[in-house]
């Protein structure tokens, strides 16, 4: 039933490690996003894919690499984790086009780097 | 740098009162604006969107847009304790990217 799902929900890891977060949507949307929300609740877009093509690539360290195997999945791989990467990462999806579109957010992955 | 600004609050109102949340945006090219509600530890959920100047009402919620002043607001009538959350304002730019404000925390006192 879940529209946008993410795994894992919590991720605790040490500096220098590499980790991945997975996202899947069953809404049939053509566009998926990764957002980072820091401790001050500021929600900032990182990447967006439309039909498996990267369309938004914000100023994000190249340690972050998104991958979209198909339009229902968008994964985020992070190399050499740093303390500053600790945040909640949200995946979202939408159907782009027309006057209005809504982004549906996943439950979030709380990443803690120690 | 495109920005959306909100007062972080908390905005505290008594139950039954009108809560007024405000937001300004810097990109004159933005056409659509969104209000998301985020409960603590949860994901944002859309409660209102607006793209025409004026007011748009949906139940207890009214969104107001003034493009000349680059100003968006959200009114919540008959506020309930369950409305206590952080409200995120977002503006859509020409590349379908949402620029979010940092949110206003609303507390509705019983």
Image: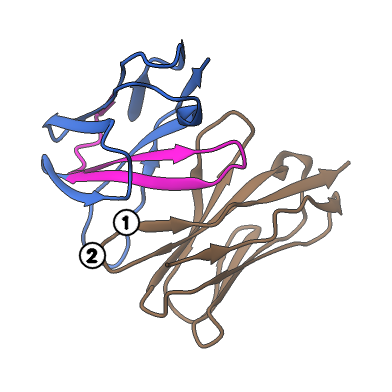
Chain colours: A blue, B brown
Q: Position of residue A29 (x, y in %)?
A: 21, 42
Figure check: B48 above or below A67: below
Mark 2 Cα-neighbour bin, 10 Å: few <14, some 14–19, many ≥20: few
Q: Does the CB distance between marks 2 and 1 fall below 8 Å? A: yes
User: Where does the magenta region start and end?
Assistant: A22-49
Check the picture and name the quadrant holding the C terminus of chain B. Answer: top right
> Residue A99, can we see it?
yes
Mark 1 Cα-neighbour bin, 10 Å: few <14, some 14–19, many ≥20: some
Figure check: B8 above or below B67: above
Q: Secondary structure at mark 2?
A: loop
In the image, taking residue A96 as reference, residue B66 lies left or right, namely right
Q: Position of residue B36 (x, y in %)?
A: 53, 50
> Residue A2, can we see it?
no
Q: Is residue A24 magenta?
A: yes
| Disc number placed over residue A101 in the picture, else none | 1
Examine the image and state in which quarter residue A74 appears: top left
Q: Chain of mark 1?
A: A
> What's the residue at 49%, 65% (across, down)?
B3
Examine the image and state in which quarter residue B52 appears: bottom left
Task: Decide which of A68, A46 is in the foreground and name it.
Answer: A46
Task: Decide which of B64, A65 is in the foreground and name it.
Answer: A65
Figure check: B39 above or below B53: above
Q: Secondary structure at mark 1?
A: loop
| Disc number placed over residue A98 in the picture, else none | 2
């Amino acid at each position: 039933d879940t529209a946008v799902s993410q795994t894992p929900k919590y991720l605790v890891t040490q500096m220098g490690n590499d980790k991945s977060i997975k996202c899947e949507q069953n809404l049939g949307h053509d566009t998926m996003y990764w957002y980072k929300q820091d401790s001050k609740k500021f929600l900032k877009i990182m990447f967006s894919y439309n039909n498996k093509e990267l369309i938004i690539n914000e100023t994000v360290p190249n340690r972050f690499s998104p991958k979209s195997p198909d339009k229902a999945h968008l994964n985020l791989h992070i190399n050499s984790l740093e303390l500053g990467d600790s945040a909640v990462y949200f995946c979202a999806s939408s159907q782009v086009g027309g006057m209005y579109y809504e982004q549906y957010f996943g439950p979030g992955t709380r990443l803690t780097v120690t | 740098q495109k920005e959306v600004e909100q007062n972080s609050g908390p905005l505290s109102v008594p139950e039954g009162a009108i809560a007024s949340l405000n937001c300004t945006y810097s990109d004159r090219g933005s056409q659509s604006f969104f209000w998301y509600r985020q409960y603590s530890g949860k994901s944002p959920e859309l409660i209102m969107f607006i793209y025409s100047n004026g007011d748009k009402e949906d139940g207890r919620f009214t969104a107001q847009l003034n493009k000349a002043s680059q100003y968006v607001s959200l009114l919540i009538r008959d506020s309930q304790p369950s409305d206590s959350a952080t409200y995120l304002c977002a503006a859509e730019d020409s590349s379908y990217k949402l620029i979010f404000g940092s949110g206003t925390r609303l507390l509705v006192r019983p």
